[in-house]
Amino acid sequence: MLSLGIVGAGTGGPAAALLLARAGHAVTLLEQTADPGPVGAGILLQPSGLAVLERLGLRDAVVARGARIERLHGQTAGGRQVLDLAYADLQPRLFGLGLHRGTLFHELYGALGPAGVEVRVGARITALARERAGVRVGAADGSDHGCFDLVVVADGARSALRTHVGGRRRVSRYAWGALWAIVKDPDGAHDGVLAQHYRGAREMVGFLPLGAPNGGAPLVSIFWSVHGERLAATRAAGLDALRARVLALAPASAALLDQVESVDSLLWSAYHDVSGRDCHDDRVVLIGDAAHAMSPQLGQGVNLALVDAWVLARLAGVGSDVPGALRRFSAQRRPQTRFYSAASRLLTPMFQSDTRVLVPRTRF
Ligand SMILES: Cc1cc2nc3c(=O)[nH]c(=O)nc-3n(C[C@H](O)[C@H](O)[C@H](O)COP(=O)(O)OP(=O)(O)OC[C@H]3O[C@@H](n4cnc5c(N)ncnc54)[C@H](O)[C@@H]3O)c2cc1C
């Protein structure tokens, strides 16, 4: 049995905590937020993420509170179809799941207590000190959270701890981000499809169904692509100006836009890009966005964090050779995370940039 300290109760942290606790390890989960809650907007669970949730016994609960996504569809303002991917074309039983980030959080977080995970909130971890017996974890307020055989750092894209872990990493921030709103879609007009509408690469609006997490009408996340330097101007121009631009791209969205009360009610989300060869040293490992944050264009962030947790729990359970387990973890995860990092870096400017490059036509 290992003693594990896991930093961050987003997605990768609780998933790893559950899997490792159920494997018989002593797990302490440390989260900076004093009162963690279901925050965020829409996320897309891929079949890989759903497979991990199935192993956690949470798949059915999550699927019941999300929206099945059968297709990813993109078209230009002129009506030209540039993206049409149907999960069933790959395998008849496959589908994605649109979900409020809070729904996934709720299910993961709720399972921690019964699995025997000790959760400490209000613990902003700032120090990882190597000792002979393991790694001592300290918080910003000076408190000592103990010494662990293995520390899993799952503190997200803005990770303050990744510099404490060996290996070189490249960290940058995308110039573009998105404004989000969650609205009701009582007629289910957006059911089944993650739809995006583009004007070149400069303008993009998307609609992600989220299901009905709390009963009632189904929800849809609207996201509007904005360059970070134009965020203030976009907000200052007001809701009518934004609404006119969205409607010019997606005229059928008027009923959804009517529910947005003000431009200030829209959530801003910015993206980071993190890459590096290794994500571990002898007793500390990075998982999720801390290791490989990327733009959301490929809809992989949450899924890669869940798969990281699954692979780590499987390897950490083999013997007490922690450095060996972490080497195998890095080697196993490298090909997939490298592929998605490179692909998202390559593709993102085709969907979000100031060029007039047209997104390529993609059909499977
Ligand atoms: C508040 C929030 C809202 C988000 N909203 C969306 C969204 O709407 N759509 C989307 O696609 N993605 C969203 N994301 C990102 C998405 O959740 C991640 O891409 C994905 O879940 C990968 O998960 P992760 O576990 O690596 O990191 P995250 O889910 O980002 O979790 C990191 C956790 O670590 C905690 N933490 C950070 N630093 C410390 C520290 N020093 N000590 C202790 N705890 C720390 C954070 O509070 C957070 O709970 C959001 C992330 C956050 C934190």
Image: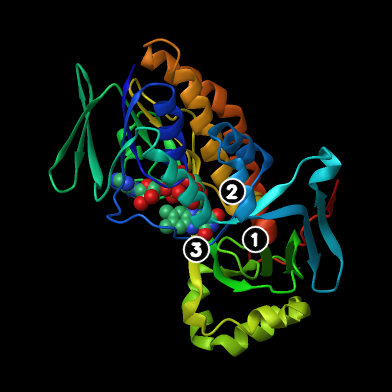
Q: Is disc 2 placed on a helix, strand or loop? A: helix
Q: Which residue is mark 2?
A: 62
**Position of residue 191 measured from the top left corner of the image (x, y, whole percent):** 75, 63
- Tell me the residue at 71%/83% (across/down): 254
| Amino acid type at image mark 3 | Ser
Say the numbered circle drawn on residue 269: 3
Say the numbered circle drawn on residue 211: 1
- Tell me the residue at 58%/47% (across/down): 61
**Position of residue 22 measured from the top left corner of the image (x, y, whole percent):** 43, 26
Q: Is disc 3 placed on a helix, strand or loop? A: strand
Residue 272 visible in this rendered orientation of the protein? no
Give me the C-alpha separation between circle 2 and circle 3: 23 Å
| Amino acid type at image mark 2 | Val
Viewer-proximal residue, 269 or 355? 269
**Position of residue 234 measured from the top left corner of the image (x, y, whole percent):** 53, 80
The first of marks 2 and 3 along the sequence is 2
The 10 Å Cα crowd at callout 1, few under 14, some 14 to 19, many 20 or more, is many
Tell us which disc is closer to us: 3 or 1.
1
Residue 209 sits in quarter: bottom right
Residue labelled 3 has its Cβ within 8 Å of some atom of ligand 1: yes
Residue 89 sits in quarter: top right
**Position of residue 98 measured from the top left corner of the image (x, y, whole percent):** 64, 55
Viewer-proximal residue, 211 or 315? 211
Q: Is disc 1 placed on a helix, strand or loop? A: strand
Viewer-proximal residue, 32 or 344? 32
The answer to whether 329 appears left or right of 356 in the picture is left
The 10 Å Cα crowd at callout 2, few under 14, some 14 to 19, many 20 or more, is many
Residue labelled 2 has its Cβ within 8 Å of some atom of ligand 1: no
Counting the numbered discs, the total is 3
